[in-house]
Image (cartoon, helix red, strand yellow):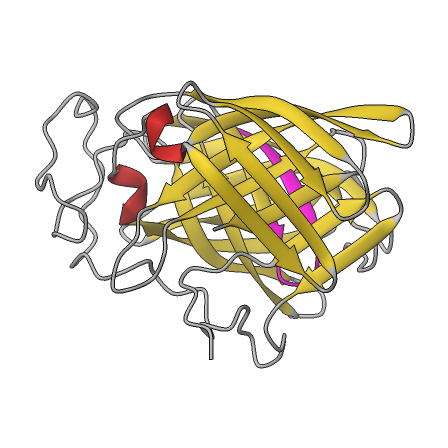
Amino acid sequence: MSTERHLLPVVAITGSSIMVACGGCTGGSCGSYGSYGSFGSYGPYVARRPGAKQAARAASSYGSCFAPVSVGADGIYEGTLTNTATQQENPVVAIIADNGDGRMSAQDGTYYRLTVATSGNSVSGSFSGYSQVATFPNGRQVTSGSLSATLSAPGLSGTLTDQVGDAEALSLNFDNVYSLSSALPYLAGTWSYSVSGFSLTATIQADGTFSANDSNSCSYTGAFGLIDSNFNAYSEEYIRSCNGSSMTFTGLASYFPATGGASAQIKMLADDNSGDYLVAVLK
């Protein structure tokens, strides 16, 4: 049995096809690890402290206890999104960068593009959602609306409300792996990803530039970038070319160092802002 930790609900959209790998998507778990639980164990959550962005970390080695020191809604999160009308709960994972850019992926294959701002403990913003199979509370495969949430001890809780008033309750738990620093050389190497017959191989250079090819004869060229070296979130932008047509994708990624016998991973969530998206775990 695979022991992948912190596995995203892996969704690859290539053209009109969708492939979802959730390791037996039942019982509220996703991925062969069995849950959206925290990456490793870092001890209790400590509330983020305004003005602490440049503070030294409480630990310099991966796996030691330390407190997150971001000052806003930025972070790596796991949690749930619940349709308030049907009470159907959908496990999700999210990356929110400290520039307010966010991406979120759900176990049912839905995908959200987020823009957030923080004032004290209050979080506000907007979202757009895309899906190729599942529908949103509005009964469609596209949605958009506003986000309102509050930062609290475990993470972030609030509501996504679409343009016709349908709501989804958001409950996210902060993952302390976000408090690791970021550096482009961490990503360097040759990485692969495969699910349900789809495969992708990417080569990333020390400056963050990369090229990739997938089993659908598509090619990728682009780059990862630093957002804030104090935190474990990277920007990503690339062009995917298939059968003579090209699309530009933008998104976010996080690096998970090797630990406990498991290999290092890069988790990436990206979209073209019009319905195509890629959520992948590179190993």
Residue segment shown in magenta: 105-115
In the displayed structure, does residue 22 sit left or right of residue 198? left
In the displayed structure, does residue 259 sit left or right of residue 148? left
Q: Is residue 106 magenta?
A: yes
| Image location of residue 104, percent across then percent down | 57, 45
- Residue 137: tell me if it is visible: no
The quarter of the displayed image where residue 44 is located = bottom left
Q: How many marks?
A: 0
29 in relation to 124, above or below? below
Q: Nearer the viewer, residue 180 or 220?
A: 220
In the displayed structure, does residue 90 sit left or right of residue 78? right
The quarter of the displayed image where residue 70 is located = top left
| Image location of residue 193, percent across then percent down | 59, 52
Give the residue at x 46% y 71%.
35
Q: Nearer the viewer, residue 227 or 258?
A: 258
| Image location of residue 108, percent across then percent down | 69, 63
Q: Is residue 84 magenta?
A: no
Give the residue at x 89% y 47%.
16
Q: Nearer the viewer, residue 228 or 121?
A: 228
| Image location of residue 172, percent across then percent down | 44, 53
Q: Nearer the viewer, residue 271 or 258?
A: 258
In the displayed structure, does residue 261 sit left or right of residue 113? left
The quarter of the displayed image where residue 9 is located = bottom right
Give the residue at x 34% y 33%.
186
109 in relation to 229, above or below? below
175 in relation to 41, above or below? above
- Residue 12: tell me if it is visible: yes
Q: Main secondary structure of the magenta part?
A: strand
Give the residue at x 54% y 41%.
268
